[in-house]
Image (spheres, helix red, strand yellow):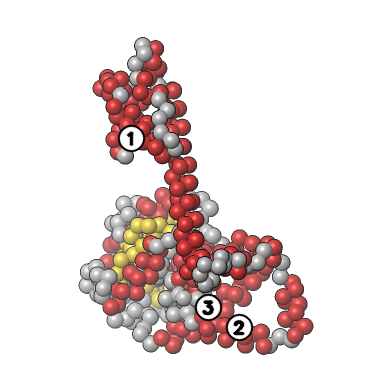
Amino acid sequence: MRIAVIIPVYNHAHFVGEAIESVLAQTRRADRILCIDDGSKDQSLAVCQRYANRGVQARGRENRGAHNTINELVQWAKAEGCDWVNVLNSDDRYLPRKLEMCAAAARANPDKQVISGRLEVIDDSGEVMPPDRPRARWFYGAQSLTETGDHSVAELIGKANFIATTSNVFARTDYLLANPFRPYRFNHDYYFLASSAWRDVLLLLPEVLMQYRIHGSNTITTKPEPLIREMLRMHLDLYHDFAAELAVDHGMRTRFADYCRTLWDNISSFHAGMFQVALAQVVAGISEQEREALAAALTGQEFDTSPNRALAGGYDGTEPLSVAKLCRKLDILREEKEQWSAERHAWNELHRIKQQLQDSHWVGLGAAFGLGKTLRRNEGKGAIEKLQKMHNALLQSRWLKLGAALGSGIARTLRREAQQL
């Protein structure tokens, strides 16, 4: 695996040195560090060039915008033979293990094309901002949405662009080349992340991997209208660009539905009501025959059952029908699912331990002399209780304790595992 860190640079002479230093300090070194200065009016390019003797390659040109600069850097990384790319905006910083952890996740999940983690917010001076600071509150709040419930990646991305920045994007070079960033001012990362979630190629890591800097020249301002309009345009583009895939891919449609359901109450400046108004304008432009043909042309498993069957049939005569009532039922089902999952895990653990006991020469020797009888008991009602009884037996077995003292590897392992629970 060859990794390139690509740094689009624009008017960040005060910050880009810190960005580069954070790459040079990685526990897993980058194979290439590539910088393009996008027509800065300060000394940003000169700061980058000071790191030439430490392997940083930097060049400048006229201003073409952030999305074009990132896309150009991806092409450069491909030419350098790098199969993975990590973006780093010139005012942000990586934490030391970012590349190491992303690379490990990529090897463990070969079906994923994009990997992102959590972030923390820093100020102009590089100090971490607490969650209750007004300018940091949104970012920490958006991340907190990932901590509640059992939600798909598509649902989470619909709730908010909690990944927040292209600096949080570690992706396959070929995937980035096939899905270049688009010419949005605010949302080129959101379009890319939403489409990756729909395709089920986005992996989320729970660790904080980078630091996002908030300062006076950040792109997003407090005036809402430009961002709201761009969010509307971005989603019109998404609907347009993915219409063909959605028509034939049931899995994508399921993830798309998850995304749209949570999108309605998102915190990323998407105005769902105005988007429906925009769709109404689009539909107004086609004839009645075209509308009829469009509805008739849709196919899929979704037509086999009522989409609201659980709600429609949920009334039992004891209280008014409501989503809250169904949510309580869902909570019960989730608890039952967790219980079954715990039982399954316990059965698997029991099977593993019993197999180790069966394969152990030391345990077999004890059985030949009539020792270690507690290890062969089958006590307890369910799998969880049986597993607990087995752990107790492992800890209490004098024969196993003697084996561990005499150097029996399996005896030592079994006792250590039991002690950790």
Percent coordinates x, y for residue 28 in the rendering: 35, 51
**Observer able to see residue 191:** no
Residue at the far front in the pictured view: 318
Closer mark to the observer between disc 3 and disc 1? 1
Measuring 47% from the left and 69% from the top, which residue is drawn there?
Answer: 324
Quadrant position of residue 400? top left
Measuring 36% from the left and 76% from the top, which residue is drawn there?
Answer: 10
Percent coordinates x, y for residue 2 in the rendering: 44, 53
Q: Secondary structure at mark 2?
A: helix
Which residue is at the front of the view, 193 or 30?
Answer: 193
Quadrant position of residue 408? top left
Numbered label attached to residue 399: none
Asked if labels 1 and 2 touch by Cβ distance under 8 angstroms, the answer is: no
Residue at the far top in the pictured view: 369
Q: Secondary structure at mark 3?
A: helix
- Which residue type does callout 3 highlight? Met
Q: Secondary structure at mark 1?
A: helix
Numbered label attached to residue 279: 2
- Which residue type does callout 1 highlight? Glu
Measuring 77% from the left and 83% from the top, which residue is drawn there?
Answer: 289
Q: Is residue 347 left or right of residue 9?
A: right
**Badge 2 density bin: few <14, some 14–19, many ≥20, Cα 10 Å:** few
Of label 2 and label 1, which has the lower sequence position?
2
Residue with the mark numbered 3:
234
Residue with the mark numbered 1:
417
- Which residue type does callout 2 highlight? Leu
Of label 3 and label 1, which has the lower sequence position?
3
Q: Is residue 284 left or right of residue 94?
A: right
Instruction: Report the Cα–Cα distance between label 2 and label 3.
Output: 13 Å
